[in-house]
C-alpha cells in the first residue's frame, strides 16, 4: 500500500515540476533570474530520486516564493535551490 502512495506522490510532483518549469519560462524577469530559478528546479528534480517528500516540500516553497514575487536576488552563485 505504501508503494501506491509513493507513486501518487511521484505523479503529483512530476506534474507540479512540469507546471513550475512552464511558469518560470513565462516569467517576465531578467534572464539571469530565470536561469537561477531553472537551476533550482533542476536541483529539486534531482532530489526526487533520493527524497521525494523533501523534494515536494522544496518545490512548494519555491513556487510559493515565485507566486509571491520573492525571486532570487543573488544569481551569481547562491545556494543549491533549497529556497
Image: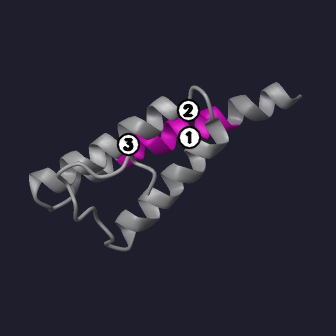
| The one of 15 and 80 positioned closer to us in this rendering | 80
- For residue 7, side relative to residue 63 (left or right): right
Q: Specify the segment rendered in magenta.
A: 9-20
Nearer to us: label 1 or label 3: 3
Residue located farthest toward the right when viewing the structure as drawn: 1
- For residue 69, side relative to residue 31 (left or right): right
What residue is drawn where x is 15% and y is 62%?
A: 28
Q: Distance of mark 1 from mark 3, alpha carbons? A: 12 Å
| Quarter of the rendering containing residue 50 | top right
**Is disc 3 placed on a helix, strand or loop?**
helix
- Residue 35 inside the magenta-drawn segment: no
- Residue 12 inside the magenta-drawn segment: yes
Q: Which residue is mark 3?
A: 41
What residue is drawn where x is 46% and y is 30%?
A: 46
For the stretch drawn in magenta, the main secondary structure is helix
**Is disc 1 placed on a helix, strand or loop?**
helix
**Above or below 67: residue 22:** above
Q: Distance of mark 3 from mark 2, alpha carbons? A: 11 Å
**Is disc 2 placed on a helix, strand or loop?**
loop
Q: Which residue is mark 1?
A: 13
Amino acid at each position: 500500500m505504501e508503494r501506491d502512495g509513493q507513486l501518487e506522490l511521484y505523479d503529483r510532483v512530476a506534474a507540479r515540476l512540469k507546471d513550475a518549469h512552464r511558469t518560470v519560462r513565462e516569467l517576465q524577469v531578467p534572464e539571469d533570474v530565470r536561469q537561477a530559478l531553472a537551476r533550482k528546479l533542476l536541483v529539486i528534480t534531482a532530489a526526487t530520486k533520493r527524497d521525494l517528500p523533501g523534494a515536494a516540500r522544496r518545490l512548494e516553497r519555491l513556487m510559493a516564493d515565485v507566486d509571491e514575487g520573492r525571486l532570487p536576488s543573488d544569481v551569481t552563485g547562491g545556494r543549491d535551490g533549497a529556497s
